[in-house]
Amino acid sequence: MFENAIGCCGAYCGSCRGCPGCTASYETGERVIAKARCKMKVCCIGKLRGNCTCADCHDFQLCNILQDFYGKNGYKYKQYRESLECILAHGSAAFVQIAKNWKRAYGRLK
């Protein structure tokens, strides 16, 4: 269940109240491309199908959509990137064990 709360971008939506993240309001917890509104979600859901993150994509390091997103000003974008790198290195279950106690969509990974 908690793994369904990881956004395509690396945000942990399970810690945010009223989060409009990738799985919000999807009754089954599955991501539905018809409900996706951002480029990242459309790409991730369209390419990878099902509950996944951009870390599951073989184009992760070279993706222009991700590079634009992580290039924005703001601390959270760096944190989201680090979250995806953690998922890539250790898997989503290990990431959730760390993130489930966060107070926002990002936090310390160590």
Image (spheres, helix red, strand yellow):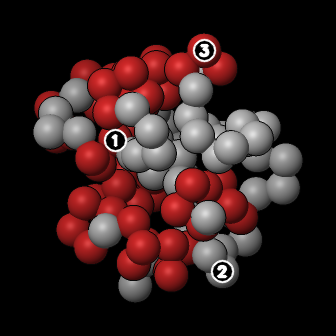
Distance between the Cα atoms at labels 2 and 1?
Answer: 22 Å
Residue drawn where x is 27% and y is 73% of the image: 90
Left or right: where does residue 67 sit relative to residue 18?
left
| Circle 3 Cα neighbour tier, 10 Å, few/some/many (<14 / 14–19 / ≥20) | few
Specify the label residue 12 is tagged with: none
The residue to which callout 1 is attached is: 54
Left or right: where does residue 30 sit relative to residue 9?
right
Q: Residue 4: image x %, image y %?
A: 57, 55
Element type at marker 1?
Answer: helix
Element type at marker 2?
Answer: loop
Q: Amino acid at mark 3?
A: Ala
Q: Quadrant of the N terminus?
A: bottom right
Above or below, 5 relative to 94:
above
Element type at marker 3?
Answer: helix
Above or below, 95 relative to 104:
below
Q: Residue 77: image x %, image y %?
A: 47, 46
Query: Which comes before the other along the chain, label 2 or label 1?
Result: 1
Distance between the Cα atoms at labels 1 and 3?
Answer: 18 Å
Distance between the Cα atoms at labels 3 and 2?
Answer: 31 Å
Task: Name the image quarter holding residue 105.
Answer: bottom right
Q: Are marks 2 and 1 in contact (CB under 8 Å)?
A: no
Task: Name the image quarter holding residue 27.
Answer: top right
Residue 95 visible: yes
Q: Amino acid at mark 2?
A: Asn
Task: Name the image quarter holding residue 99.
Answer: bottom right
Q: Quadrant of the C terminus?
A: bottom left
The residue to which callout 3 is attached is: 34
| Circle 1 Cα neighbour tier, 10 Å, few/some/many (<14 / 14–19 / ≥20) | many
Q: Residue 37: image x %, image y %?
A: 61, 17
| Circle 2 Cα neighbour tier, 10 Å, few/some/many (<14 / 14–19 / ≥20) | few
Left or right: where does residue 50 sit relative to residue 2?
left
